[in-house]
Image (tube, rainbow, N blue to C red):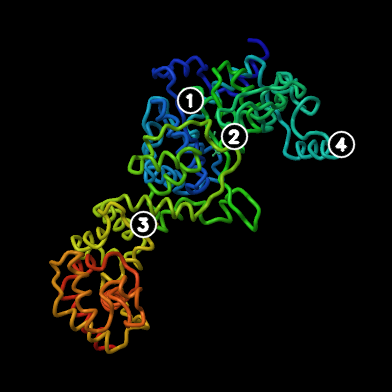
Amino acid sequence: MNDYDLMAELLLPRIDKTPDYYENLYPKRSIPEGARVTRIAPSPTGYLHLGTLFAALVNRITATASRGIFYTRIEDTDKKREIEGGIEDIIDGLNRFGIAIDEGFISGQEEKGEYGPYRQSRRAEIYGAYAKELIRKGLAYPCFCTEEELEEVRSRQEAEKLRTGYYGKFAKHRDISYNEAKALADSGKPFVVRLKSPGREQNKIIFDDVIKGKIEMPENDEDFVLLKSDGIPTYHFAHAVDDHLMGTTHVLRGDEWISSVPKHIQLFKILGFKPVRYGHIAPIMKLDGGAKRKISKRKDPEAAVRFFAEQGYDSESVINYLMTIAASDFEDWRRANPCESYKKFKFNLKKMSVSGALFDENKLIDVSKNTVSRMSGEEVYGKLTEWAHEFDKEFYVLLTRDPEYTKAVVSIDRDAAKPRKDIAKWNEAKDYFSYFYNELYTPSSEYPDNVSKDDVIKFLEEYKAVYDPADDRQVWFDKIKQIAPGLNFAAESKEYKANPQNYKGQAGDLSTVLRIAVTGRRNTPDLCSIMKVLGKEEVFRRIDSAVKSI
Ligand code: GLU
């Protein structure tokens, strides 16, 4: 055994497998030429946030477009920051948004696939094997520096206006001998394992980011940590080992990682891994007091994906909206293909914005209205009741009391060629549909100014005498027009416009009276349909009580 072998045994005595073992255990994926294997690798240190959902979407559609694979890996190496239920929230959230997961964690508890475990805390031995091999080759070494020592070096570097970090002459243990290491380890001093970086700052590396294009950066010369003192890998090391063994072809991740690329490229090379392609996704931004800034988990409620669920934005709306951020050509495609699933869109990473796109809730509302307008009544019923079940129990009870009635309510004006676009999210539905449920209905007696109280009463009573729920829209309005002249209202708006002085108003004013009497509102979807759904008995009851309360 040479000194490096002895060092490897000293530092990682319990690791008894070599990288070869894992290379055989996880053979290359047999996927078609050009198929992309992508992933998201969230840390369960918080709930699913918009940035993660966005990255998942971009990775998913990239895999789909190439008939590849999209998988999830849980990066839970920071046990101190982990939150209870974090994995569930993230994975269930992706499921809820229809981001299909081919492999890895497919729910909070279940993982599937041949390349697992898909949770880093269960892969310690794998990282150990690769680290041990690097130590054996003299490419990694133990560092026994304490926090205080490192802090002291940093202060010195800052004082001398030098780049901070563990590199070059500041890399105290870079050439530590086996005997020195043994003495320190035997005395119980904790150590980390660092990479012996062969890089030089003066050298440049160039890489072709699949989103941002060519990027030039200085080579890494830092002896960064591979394994922490508890044997847990750093993100850098785990990323290289995992993405290699799991056969990732494209790492599409937040652009906060761009500065780490030199480290990652170096690691892949030293470990003898085929490099992956990187693509760095610009963050979603927000306007704050006129300035653009990254959406913040701490400051912005919309950073948590749960916000959208609570508000009742349909998952499809949010995804359609995120697609408009992901691809500059998506909106044109959507206009040409209003009814297709976004999954049919040919996504191209090159069309992604390289600087952060602005989160625009008005745009989301707009996209949502369009998305909801394309849904069938049956679909709206299903989604609305599902939302209400979780977020508005009282409304849920009303909605499900008579499912056929509610389905009729939500179907009004829906199957028309130009369906109404007025609901963006389910939390607006209660107010929007309130007059269909007596518990929520608030009558109004704010009639148009040009219709006297007397005329309101006369009109409503005459109307009752002729109303027939079987009438279609045309007949329904014709009956109002027939009553109009007797009250000195013009039947046709043309007549009224020609000689306004001759009339108190026009038939449209009278239909407004009816609308207010029946729904308590001036604006609603098609009143004829509303009255059919409410039923003659309820319509008459409301008309009678409107007449009484005048
Ligand atoms: N665990 C890292 C994060 O949550 C993953 C970054 C990556 O995708 O490689 O930011």
- Alpha carbon separation for disc pair 4 and 1: 42 Å
Above or below 394: residue 77: above
Q: Amino acid at mark 3?
A: Lys
Between 340 and 201, the residue placed more toward the observer is 340
- The spot of residue 144 in percent (x, y) is 71, 30
Q: Are marks 2 and 3 in contact (CB under 8 Å)?
A: no
Disc 1 target residue:
248
Q: Mark 2, residues whose alpha carbon is within 10 Å: few (<14), some, or many (≥20)? A: few
Q: Nearer the viewer, mark 4 or mark 3?
A: 3
| Residue 9 sits in quarter | top right
Q: Nearer the viewer, mark 2 or mark 1?
A: 1
Q: Secondary structure at mark 3?
A: loop
- Residue 361 as seen in the image, left or right of residue 505: right
Query: Quick one: quadrant of the C terminus?
Result: bottom left
- Alpha carbon separation for disc pair 2 and 3: 57 Å
Disc 2 target residue:
230
Q: Nearer the viewer, mark 2 or mark 3?
A: 3
- Alpha carbon separation for disc pair 3 and 1: 42 Å
Sequence-first disc among 4 and 3: 4
Above or below 447: residue 98: above
Sequence-first disc among 2 and 1: 2
Q: Are marks 2 and 1 in contact (CB under 8 Å)?
A: no
Residue 160: give its label: 4
- Alpha carbon separation for disc pair 4 and 3: 63 Å
Sequence-first disc among 4 and 2: 4
- Alpha carbon separation for disc pair 4 and 2: 33 Å
Q: Secondary structure at mark 4?
A: loop
Between 496 and 94, the residue placed more toward the observer is 496
Asked whether residue 328 appears in the rendered view, the answer is: yes
